[in-house]
Amino acid sequence: MSSLELQVIFHPDLSPGYNMAVDWWLFNRVSRPTIRFYGWSRPALSIGYSQQYRVPDKLNQLIDKFPVVIRPTGGGWLLHAGDLTFSLIVPVGHRLFDQTIRGFYRLIRERLEKLLGIDSQQPVEQDFTGAGLVSDCLGTCGVHEPSINGKKWLVSAQLRNSRAVIQQISLFLDSRAWPQTTGISKPFFLDQLDSRLLKANLRAAIIRDFQNNIFGQTSTHIRQFTAVEWKQIARSVSCFRLDCLQDLPKFSPRSDGRLEI
Amino acid sequence: MTKDYPQELLYTKKHLWYDPENCWVGITKNGQEELGEVVYIELPEPGEQIAAGDTLVLIESLKATYEMAPPVAGVVGEVNRQLSSRPELINSDPYGAGRLVRLEITDVDLQMLTVQEYIEFCCE
């Protein structure tokens, strides 16, 4: 594989724990710029890394309804239902690695707005809210998380260290998949837009656009995990599941030996 | 702009500052602005040996989780425990109450930036 290729990963829908374990594996192992598309085998809640230490009240009410998974990235909790989820992984050495945190968010927002032809409202940077540990991703206003009619259509979160950056991204595509009785604030679903790109074409369009305009790679390479790699990934799945809210801590990149994959 | 970056400190391109007088390490004003509102921090234990590039502290802001690494190896001395309950001090007082840890540097080659070099780097 050439260093100029963008590594692309698709696979069938996975359980919530597996989805995070795959991203964690890629964050720790990948040496090429990578984009990974993934789906959820059932609706699930993902919570920001530190929310495992202070479980939001609202989440306690939802824990019986949906499986909960800990994201390695930050941010508030988010219901995954009818969203297109994908991750960008950039290893050190790639020019994008030097992009600032906010610069990363801005790049992604600008490309997706252009691709989808969306003229969305830009969030106003809020003063310190103190709500970070208990917040709902869709109910708070983040930098470079645009909205339409006050509702977000794009949510993303980031983890970075000295070796790599990973950005986990959700685009809301299918409003029929959103549970009706949860009381969770509903995002703006892109199926409300008359976009020729939606659904089948969107994933391919994102790859093409991000390859050229974000990663600056000349071609793509479809990457599949080997059986050995799936076994390595499987080892950390349980670390990301929040099965029991009292059983803390669950996951720590600094200290959890189980995650040294 | 220089008032935001004390002259006596050294700086890194990853927006950490280092005080050669007392070995305290923290996040620069520019660094905390980039992170946004800090909501959570995991600190190392005193005595812990940190290699260059290893995670010194894990910081979560509203949108990003950042494993911050020192540019040089060292041994953790004092730790600012106050940050565990008040991580927002990193935003409000990055050179004082929001400082992170004392790091007794064991590397000879510091390779850090002066305040002028850091400001030029931030303006690039």
Image (cartoon, coloured by chain):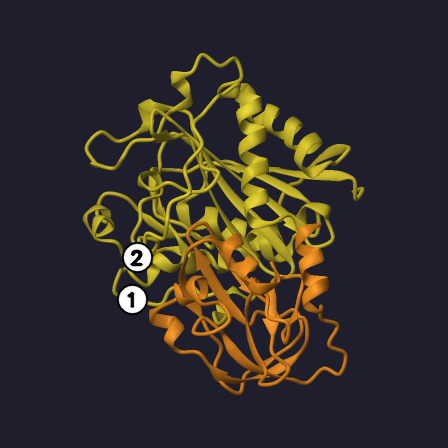
Chain colours: A yellow, B orange
Q: Look at 56% across and 57% down and name the residue there.
A: B30
Name the one closer to the observer, A201 or B16: B16
- Of the 4 image quadrants, the one containing the N terminus of chain A is top right
Q: Residue furthest right?
A: A2
**Residue A66 on image: x %, y %:** 28, 44
- In terms of secondary structure, where does tag 2 sit? loop
Name the one closer to the observer, A200 or A107: A107
Whether residues under marks 1 and 2 lie with C-beta atoms below 8 angstroms apart, the answer is: yes
Task: Tally the numbered discs.
Answer: 2
Calculate the distance from the C-alpha at mark 1 to the C-alpha at mark 2. Answer: 8 Å
Type of amino acid under label 2: Asp
Taking A187 as reference, is A111 left or right? right
Taking A209 as reference, is A185 left or right? left
**Residue A142 on image: x %, y %:** 42, 42
Circle 1 residue: A247
Q: Alpha-carbon neighbours of circle 2 within 10 Å: few (<14), some, or many (≥20)?
A: some
Q: Alpha-carbon neighbours of circle 1 within 10 Å: few (<14), some, or many (≥20)?
A: few
Q: Look at 74% across and 53% down and name the residue there.
A: A93
- Of the 4 image quadrants, the one containing the C terminus of chain A is bottom right
- Chain for mark 2? A
Type of amino acid under label 1: Asp
Q: Which of the labelled discs sits on residue A189, or is there none? A: none
Taking A250 as reference, is B64 left or right? right
- In terms of secondary structure, where does tag 1 sit? loop
- Chain for mark 1? A
Q: Which of the labelled discs sits on residue A243, or is there none? A: 2
Residue A261 visible to an observer of this rendering: no
Q: For residue A137, which quarter of the picture?
A: top left
Residue B7 visible to an observer of this rendering: yes
Is the residue A192 above or below the residue A224 in the image? above
